[in-house]
Amino acid sequence: MSRFEIYSPEGLRLDGRRWNEVRRFECSINTHAHAADGSSYLEQGNNKIITLVKGPKEPSLRSQANSLKATMDVSVNITRFSKFERSAISHKNERRVLEIQTALLRTFEKNIMLHLYPRTQISIQVHILQQDGGMFASLINGITLALIDAGIAMYDYVSGISIGLFDTTPLLDVNTLEENAMSTVTLGVIGKSEKLSLLSVEDKIPLDRLESVLAIGIAGAHRLRDLMDEELRKHAHKRVIKASTK
Amino acid sequence: MAKEIITPVAESKFILDALKENQRLDGRSFDKFRDVDISFGKEYGDATVTLGKTKVQCRVSCSITQPYEDRPFEGLFIISTEMSPMAGPQFENGSNTGDDEVLCSRIIEKAIRRSGALDVEGLCIVAGSKCWAIRADVHVLDCDGGIIDASCLAVICALLHFRKPDVSILGEQVTVHPINEREPVALGILHIPICVTFSFFNPQDVEENIKGAGNNEIAIIDATLKEESLRDGVLTVTLNKNREVVQVSKAGGLPMDALSLMDCCHKAYDITERITDQILALIKEDSQKRNKFAQILSSENAR
Amino acid sequence: MSIEAVCGVLTHVDGSSQVEWNDTKVLCSVTGPIEPKARQELPSQLALEVIIRPAKGVSSTREKLMEDKLRSVLTPIITLYQYPRQLCQITCQILESGESEYEFSEKELSCCINAAFLALIDAGIALKSTVSSISLVISQNNEVIVNPTGAQLLNSRSVHILALELIKEMNIVNNVLLLDSNGDFNEKELFQVLETGEKSCLALGQDLRKVIQNNVDSNIIQ
């Protein structure tokens, strides 16, 4: 089918990783301090994502205000230049994008302490500068970081990861080539728990393999959560030093 | 959705309290799927699925058109799920950009079209110039919860039931034989995906759900409209009889333990098996009823 | 073949009916009076939202035209001024067309009118009078055929839809609400259509009354 060898007999993947290794994961927060209340820039493999969180702020429409909790909205902007070939059409009203927006909204609605911010609005904007495999999962990580930067109270981290299934071997954190060649599962895991906020399988997977895929995915998501935590602590440390030297 | 369904506080509290005591309003147990009733219309490709009070009709039609340039050997297959106020005042005519409508159409799309339930290569007539375009129109007539499950069933039943006119090809000349002239041919259905929807409720406080290890969340199968309006999370699993997961969608909502989700998938498989057998039996029965000459022409005898 | 109709088939709308007549099957729902959106609201009367959805494919100008005709039949018989600033949604779903959809809409429309009338009564919307509608054709040998089949439509010289306003227990014709004729016909033939149509509409009216009576009997405990 493909001229690439997705997973070699020696146990190496296209980009030289083993089955249980994640891609390069680099993130930074507070990248757009003048544009938003919270922001993050995330590179997960070749995904490059800017996330902006604005709020809690006065709702733009009075009808959006809820006297019990904050209202949220998520908009995902897949730029036309995010793939190798420039897309001729805007992705804005594609059903796939609408679905992703709804899924992200519903994931974070349950993880943000919305009741602490009644009559306000929290809007999340995601801009995808470059697309790679597991884009949906990376969006979750980007939003988690930006929400933390905005200082919005959450119960825990939500980390996203996608896992492919090659024959019987689960491959952690797939890239585009792998994603196109096999079925993938996307997970959104809460903190260090085994609770899934989001689970999406878009292609056929044998029922009996699903459990092992989930187990690997959860372990990978915990690893990403640690990487995010580390970066946040580093950033916080820098800010504390800056503030104390003034 | 245009108008949000508002359940009175007293009623919602009653439903939730009942759930905590393992009771549902309609007396079903938590993992009981409502009885599925399938009926076929006079014409080929007309199936109506009744799931409790939910009623969905699917109508499959075909026409000849030109295939996409990049896929000259494949026919076209479109599923249209448009809601109308007939299903309930919460739906608006012509606007299908509501969250639930988008999720519903995407899940059915993934479950049936993307999973390759219909053999699109079998729809090719002349490569690159002529192919069948199959269209499935889903009409939600009455909505009492579980429209995704019912719509998926309706589409797959209608596809199984549908017959397209026979064609014969002589060089570039394509002749379409009307149904009354030559026996029409069935579509190639490669597998039968069945959707099962679980609704989750959190009987405790939010902290317990996220931090606790109790995993006391309630999962019910095939919620009614009232239960749907109160649920905290939803999971739709699509499986087929070959023990393949075709599609799983848990778009956020109440965080659930991975093992309980796996448990849901296994429960869904039992339901899938049962419903698949039911569909196949009904299709067989219907085709026997239509083919009244089979008995005369058959060489089978009582001996 | 007589009309087969039932009321109250749907549960989440205020009124509904299913009408099956000679291979054409229509399901109609009525919701109202409900709160309208700001752009639909009429300050002094009930706003009507009429929707007709085809059995196959997306709705096009054909359905829009049918919606328009259905609205023009229903508007005079509903007591619109009793419900100011309210909305009534009337949705017709064609289940089986029974005619060639590219050329005709006569059978579907006449069934929609009858179904909408029954559904309005089922929903308890106040009406000034009653309506019944039939489709007719004039065949190649100049015969007037009431409620034709799909094949008779194809072989016709002209096609007509007639909707009459009936009063006094649906025994007397008060007005013509819709007469829509297409094809090749002359004045004499048109009057012949009206004459035959009047008889059939009155007969149909009695059938519809029976349907309503059955519905009332089954809903009300005496």
Image (cartoon, coloured by chain):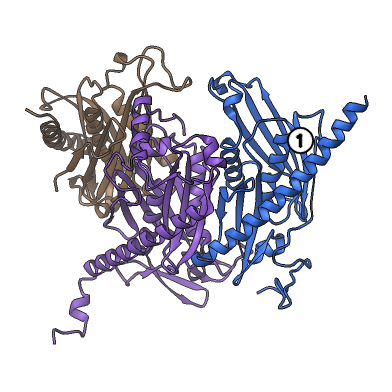
Name the residue that disc number 1 marks: A39
| Quadrant occupied by the C terminus of chain B | bottom left
Q: Is residue A66 visible?
A: yes
Residue B166: where, in percent of width, then height?
39, 71
As rendered, which of B175 and C140 lies closer to the eye?
Answer: B175
Taking the image as shown, residue B257 lies to the left or right of residue B282, namely right
Find residue A90 and report its image quarter: top right
Residue that appears at 57% across and 43% down:
A103
Hey, what amino acid is under mark 1? Ser
Q: Is residue C215 left or right of residue C76?
A: left
Helix, strand or loop under label 1: strand
Q: Position of residue A210 (x, y in %)?
A: 54, 62
Q: Nearer the viewer, residue B91 or B241?
A: B241
Provide the letter of the chain coloured purple.
B
- Residue appearing at x 48%, y 40% in the figure: B100
Which chain is brown in the picture?
C
- Residue positioned 54% across, 42% down in the render: B212
Q: Which chain is blue?
A: A
Q: How far from the left and from the top, in percent, is residue A15?
A: 78, 66
